[in-house]
Each structure stands twice: as structure tokens, then as C-alpha cells.
Amino acid sequence: MRKESVEFNGINLEPMEYGHDDHLDAVLYSEKEDPVEQEIRAVLRSRYWLLRFPQHLESEFTALYIPRAIQLFHFRSPLLFLLFLIENIGIYQVLPAEITQYYFSLNAWTGIMIVIASVLSYLPQLSRWYEWYIGVGGVVAIAVSTATANIGGGDSVILTYAGTMYIVVVLYSFVCLRFRAAMIVGWMGGIFGIILAHLLGHPMNWKLYNLTYTMTSILGMCLAYALDRQERTNFLQACLLRHSVDKGQKLAQQLNTLSRQDGLTGLANRRHLDEVLRHEWNRALRQQLPLTLMIIDVDFFKRYNDRWGHLAGDECLQQIATLIASFAKRSGELASRYGGEEFVLLFPSMAEQEAAQQAERLLSGIKKLGLPNPEEDHSFVTVSIGVAVCLPSADVSVARLLRQADVALYHAKENGRNRYAFFNDAMLNKDGVDLTRA
């Protein structure tokens, strides 16, 4: 059954000319997810209620999250300081004059913490400690705010406790601490605040404290949990997308390689040969440099297949192809499977003398392989080589060069095989071949 052509990322994959390409099928039709994708999908399905990934994913998430958190804090820290000033201006308006200096001498530490955290966030070497220094600043700010919330009495108490609510909201939603860090900092700040108030002899208004700090902390925890979980979901989805893109690019590269590669031998296929040959022909035409083309045919290969079977025949072609590939090392040189048991070697900028040396080396290399073939006169596998060397011009075409090499190959076979022959005009006179139409 003829296989339809496939188009992928602009690459048109025609049916293989010889045999069935299992490698291409494996790339095109495999639907099995790789382990990385399976793991990410498993984590997504688990819902990660505890907000914790496997260690390597957690490390990757942290490495992406912290720089973005710092970038946001750079933008938000001036706003935090501005809100802090506005809040304290309001408190100053209602605070009894006799305790104003004392109150602000303590509460100033909140502003100092904002400034210090802002400065530290601009030091790249401290990036990994971002949640730590923000956490320390948050504990100090909440503790000071809690300890001083009830010292003024009267109308000022409402504003000071509102200030505590402001700090808690900022901690849970504005400075980009992840849920666990924000929760630890929030409750540690509250506990230290109660202890500090006791040490300073400040009374605690437990009703206001619970209505402001405690309730705001619970609300903040819910908000921080939702934000953290959403960040993690976005991260996993981005991982899947990035992985899919990477896999698609890798697949495109594999398909591009397979579309240019012979499935059995790994050499360039006919399509790739045509592309490279046109390119090198045009380059040789511009630079007026010679171009050498060799067509190599395995002698009596049908007999070899009939005697040893197709699997042995494939192995024979693979070994010969490996040897032929070793001859195409320089830029522009190409080893290609031309069809069946025929191969092509393309040598840019190679004149006839060097081409003869290469052909002799190739014949010698085939002999050294020692592939047994009792049906052949030499008892081992041999090849015949047709060589065409030309200087490209407007009157000569790529097709003519191929035809010349083919005619030379015919003469090598006619004269006993296991040899090479260069194309010359005498071959035209002998065979009456018209190359002007090629």
C-alpha cells in the first residue's frame, strides 16, 4: 500500500523510495508521553493542596518565582512607603501630644524595615534570601504595630489597629511571599507583638485585636493560599507548554533529518542529494571550479541478495555506506544513497587527478571490508564506479553531469567490474548517447 505524504512544520515528507522507514513512523506516529510530561500532568491532577512540588520542580519553581517577586517589590516598595507615611500622618492628627514622640519612635521601625528591604532587594547576591529579609521586616513591622496599637486610647486606637490591618494585608498580598512564608511571618509577628506589648507595659484591647489582626490574618492566609496555588498552576502549565514547544522543535528537527536521510544506510537520500548538488553546481559555476560526481554500484548485488537473503543484503549495504560516508568529510562533500545498491559521492573543487586517487582508495576500502560473496569472481563483494568531472557552464546542466557519471559506470561494468572509469567523449561515440538533451 502506498503511504501518503506528510507535511510537518513546512517539511513535506514524501513516501520512502525504497522500503519501509520504521524510524520515520516512530517519530510521526508515536503518542507516548515522555516521563517529564507524565510527571507534570500527575502533579496537576494531584491538586497539590499542600502547595509543595517534588523537589526538582519545587527548585525550578523557586528559581523562577523569586526574581519575579523581587521585580514586583521594586515597583511596590515606594508605594508601601507612601502608604506608611499617609497612615502615620492620619494617626498623628488624633494621637495625644504627650505620647506622639514615643509612639513614632517605635513605629518608625516599620518605615525603616521598608527602606532596608527595598535596598536589599537591589543586591543580586541576596536574591536567594529575599523571603528571609522580607520575612524579618514583616515580623518587626507587625510586632511593633501590635505592641503600640492601644497606647493612645480614644479615637487614635481605631487608626492604630487599622494600621496593623494594613501591614497584615501588605504581608499576605503585596510583597509576594509564598503562602508558608507569609503565614509564618504573620503569626510570628502577632505573637512577638503581644510579648513586646507586655514587656513595654502596653495594654491589649483583645476585642479590637481579634477583629483586626486575627480576622485580617485569616483572610490574608486565604488570599495568600489562593495566590500561591494559582502561581503554581501557572508554572506547571507553562512547563507543559514549554516542554511541548521543545518537543515540537525536536520533532521538527528529527523529521527534517529523516526527510533528508536514507532510512537504511543513514546517508543522504535522493532529495537531499538533489538540493546539495544544485547548490554546489551553482557555487562552482560562480567560482569556476571543477565538480566531481561518482556513482558507485555494488557488483552482482542481486546474486548476493538471492544467496544470503535480504537481511544480509541490508547489512552489506550498511557496511558499504559507512565506508562511503567516510570519504565525504569536507564542506560541500556529500555521500548519498542513489537508489537500491547505488550510491553517489559529490566532491566540489576536485579535479580529475584527485578524483582518481579517491576512487582507488574506495575500491581498496571495499576490498578490505572482505564481505564474502562466493557467487562473484573475486569471492568478495566489489563495486564499480563511474566518475564524471566537469567545469560547470551555461551549456552544461546538473542532469548531464549525472548522465555522464552513469555512462562511465556502465563502461566500468562492461570492462570487468571492480574498477572505476572516467567519463570521456569517446564513450559517447561508442554508444551513440546524446547528452545534449540532458
Image (cartoon, helix red, strand yellow):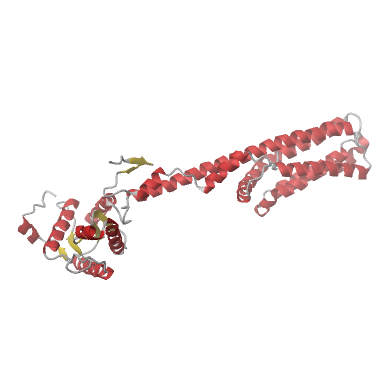
Q: Is residue 408 above or below residue 78?
A: below
Q: Is residue 198 above or below residue 266?
A: above
Residue at figure coordinates x 32%, y 60% from the top left: 331
Residue at figure coordinates x 78%, y 36% from the top left: 217
On screen, residue 265 versus residue 60, left or right, reads left
Instruction: Mark yes or no: residue 297 visible.
Output: no
Residue 269, position in %: x, y?
A: 29, 52
Q: Is residue 119 above or below residue 217?
A: below
Residue at figure coordinates x 17%, y 58% from the top left: 405
Q: In this figure, what is the number of numbered marks?
A: 0
On screen, residue 228 versus residue 189, left or right, reads left
Residue at figure coordinates x 22%, y 65% from the top left: 373
Residue 190, position in %: x, y?
A: 83, 41
Residue toward you, 363 or 182: 363
Residue 239, position in %: x, y?
A: 55, 44
Instruction: Mark yes or no: residue 360 visible.
Output: yes
Which quadrant, please, contains the N terminus? top left
Residue toward you, 222 or 39: 39
Residue toward you, 395 or 112: 395
Residue 254, position in %: x, y?
A: 39, 49
